[in-house]
Image: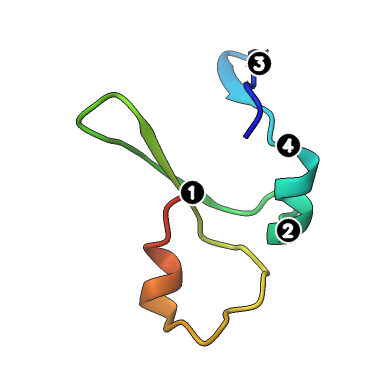
Amino acid sequence: MATQKILKVGNSLGITLPSNLVKDLSLKPGDSVDVVRELNNTLAVNFIDSHQLSLGLSPKARHNKHL
């Protein structure tokens, strides 16, 4: 993955997503994202509304997939 910059968005901060990731996951504006801070100060990002093919995974397994 490429290094992304943190941007100011209104009173918040945001991070852009590489276009190939957006395309691969079929992400759309307004899709939900679950962000979890891990113990080592890394972030686990779960794209809840991803429209990608499930590859036979159960809904729970898809929800818990970390990127």
Does the residue at mark 2 contact the one at mark 3 (Cβ under 8 Å)?
no
Q: Label 1, label 2: how many angstroms apart (C-alpha)?
A: 12 Å
Q: Which mark is residue 24?
A: 2
Q: Label 3, label 4: how many angstroms apart (C-alpha)?
A: 21 Å
Q: Where is residue 9 shown, x and y percent of the image?
A: 66, 18
Q: Which mark is residue 67?
A: 1
Q: Label 2, label 4: how many angstroms apart (C-alpha)?
A: 10 Å
Q: Label 1, label 3: how many angstroms apart (C-alpha)?
A: 26 Å
Amino acid type, residue under disc 3 in the picture: Gly
Q: Which mark is residue 10?
A: 3
Earlier along the polypeptide chain: callout 3 or callout 4? 3
Amino acid type, residue under disc 4 in the picture: Pro
Q: Is residue 29 visible?
A: no
Depicted 34 relative to depicted 48: above or below = above
Q: Where is residue 52 shown, x and y percent of the image?
A: 67, 70
Depicted 64 relative to depicted 33: above or below = below
Earlier along the polypeptide chain: callout 4 or callout 1? 4
Residue at the left extreme, as displayed: 39
Residue 14, by quadrant, is top right
